Amino acid sequence: MTAQSGRHFLQIPGPTNVPDRVLRAMAQPTIDHRGPDFAELALDLRQRVKPVFGTGGPVVIYPSSGTGAWEAALVNTLSPGDRVLAFETGHFASLWRDMAQRLGLTVDFVPGDWRRGVDPAAVAERLAADTAHGIAAVMVVHNETSTGVTSRIPEIRAAIDDAEHPALLLVDTISSLGSIDYRHDDWGVDVTVGCSQKGLMLPPGLGFNAISDKALAAAPQARLPKSYWDWAPILDANEHGFYPYTPATNLLYGLREALLMLEEEGLRNVFARHSRHAAATRAAVQGWGLEVLCVNEREYSGSLTAVLLGAEHDADKVRRIILDRFDMSLGTGLGKLAGRVFRIGHLGDLNDLTLAGTLTGVQMGLELAGVAVDPAGLQAALSVLKAE
Ligand SMILES: *Cc1c(COP(=O)(O)O)cnc(C)c1O
């Protein structure tokens, strides 16, 4: 590796740039996780983490990746052979489906073209047809990180309610938490799955489950095997500020600092900042004469934009040039989008000039890779940023 001056631009849709404040908070000494100082930290976090999920209920924090928190959501609420309804919105929805199948669940997987979100009408149709109420849960990825498409959770909830169906609603909010408006309680979500390294501006290593009363009540009947992921002993120990195992103490220091930063800016302002940066990014992409992968304006993601290239171009070559020349990482195309798209992450600790620098690097990289782009794209993005 050659020496690089200045900061690396980590513009993938997670992990995201970790603010210096958070890094410094994590550099404190690791303490006794059964002592009084730890209890104070854990009891503070137990409350402080709730607003970011939009919940007044419990949030379990695991030392895990997001994938672990996916598993926790399933094993705490479901039993072997249960039917679940899921939607092929992209790579992450497909991986969660695979996990459900491996755990012994039967998945009704509604096919999709990886360019739009969950169709609430499809939810209504599937649940209306399930008159015997065999479907135990509906699994939705809120913000599909492989495509830059955000599904409309309130409309999905309304479809479940209109069908008068008792299924639990399980939502992956991993790449929307702390960057796109999300309301666990108001939207009637039963389990919300989150993790640390995306909008929460932390390193990887924490997974979250926000849990509704209905999901808590379902848990004792859920017969999928579980031990480490079991909510019950964690919720018990959390009451006194402890965990049934060694928690990720230093990541929890970081979590407190990141939550303080979100509180200081105000969640509404955080969401507005992200949607403004997303709009500027789309202005650049469209100005360049390229295509945003998401085809439904109502489902544009506030946290990342996937850019579709013509079949004659290799998106990974563009990414490679940008990394080599400008020290910036962009997201690769996942699954069947490999080589066809690159993804610009604009979530987490970001300001107007970080985005302007990012888009400048993308434009130069596209030009160097021989992709014909109209340089007016960058100007269009700057106009959005200047506007207000
Ligand atoms: C990143 C991501 C995951 C996986 O999280 P890991 O921490 O890599 O296990 C799952 N779902 C979505 C939507 C994601 O963006």
Image (cartoon, helix red, strand yellow):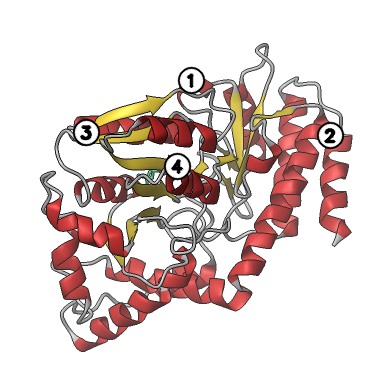
Whether 277 is drawn above or below 376: the answer is: below
CB under 8 Å between discs 4 and 3 = no
Left or right, 205 with reference to 341: left
| Callout 2 amino acid | Gly
Disc on the earlier residue, 4 or 1: 4
Name the residue tied to disc 3. 105
Q: Nearer the viewer, residue 306 or 144?
A: 144
Distance from Cα at disc 1 to Cα at disc 2: 26 Å
CB under 8 Å between discs 3 and 1 = no
Callout 4 crowding tier (Cα within 10 Å): few <14, some 14–19, many ≥20: many
Name the residue tied to disc 1. 336
Residue 338 visible somewhere in the drawing: no
Disc on the earlier residue, 3 or 1: 3
Q: Is mark 4 within 8 Å of ligand 1?
A: yes
Q: Residue at x 56, y 45 (%)?
A: 152
Name the residue tied to disc 2. 287
Q: Nearer the viewer, residue 320 or 13?
A: 13
